[in-house]
Image (cartoon, rainbow, N blue to C red):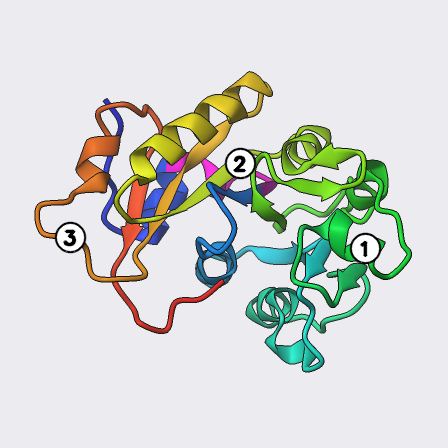
Amino acid sequence: MGMIVPSLAQWLETSGVLDASGIFVTGTDTGVGKTHVGVLLIHTLRVLGRTVIPRKPVESGWLEDSGATDAAQLAQAAGVTLDSRVCPYHFRAALAPPRAADQEGQTLRIRELAATCPVRWEKGQFLHVEGAGGFYSPIAHDGLNADLAQILGLPVVLVAEDKLGCINQVLLTAEAIRQRQLRLAGVILNVRTPPLEGMDNLSDLQKYLQEPVVRFPFDSSHFG
């Protein structure tokens, strides 16, 4: 039986994230709200006294207005300047990163993406790494998000859109994370549309997960 926690700060404590040195944020799919959730996580961590190091190793669908990109949102939340350390690889096409890189004549290697993340940081600092797409989505020509997460070895935060069908997606991804011998810190359900009458994914997931689950209330401005 898993736990339902009412607030993000409590979820951070219950999940063990608050005591960790960093996290890898992944999703059940693309477009589930990883960046939106990440911004809220970073804000909360900073309020709780952590200095956050944001990393978005690669981003596709890069906008001419870089201030509107996922990487920029993470950097702004962390109170740092968006530069090549935050997001060293970015491509215009809104495709899986290796496909987007192909269109610009570049090759992405999983070890190169991992190398964009620091391996040592000071006490009180917190490494926040956001993947691209879902856990088993390609992120490089030679690897998946799962491979990057495995190299980094950070606890994994799983974001899912709170919608009909997400229980299957969450449980499949949670099992994949465990099979990679990674620690699933917990699940965050991102509510992007009003829920169907009678649907309660939060309560249902606690029957199948040991990890804490939290749900963000509906906000029509949710994107990511």
| Residue in the picture at 65% in, 34% down | 149
Relative placement, left or right, of 123 versus 168 is right
Mark 2 / mark 3, whichever is N-terminal:
2
Mark 3 = which residue? Answer: 196
Residue at image point 44% right, 66% down: 223
Q: Position of residue 123 (x, y in %)?
A: 66, 46
**Picture quarter containing residue 82?**
bottom right
Query: Badge 1 local density, few (<14 within 10 Å), some, or many (20+)?
Result: many
In depth, the one of 68 and 122 nearer the eye is 68
Residue type beneath disc 2: Val
Which image quadrant for residue 137? Answer: top right
Residue contact at pointers 3 and 1, CB within 8 angstroms: no
Q: Position of residue 174 (x, y in %)?
A: 44, 28
Boundaries of the magenta span: 15-23
Sooner in the amino-acid sequence: mark 3 or mark 1? 1
Spatial CA distance of label 2 from label 1 is 26 Å
Q: Residue at x 35, y 37 (%)?
A: 14
Q: Is residue 173 left or right of residue 8?
A: right
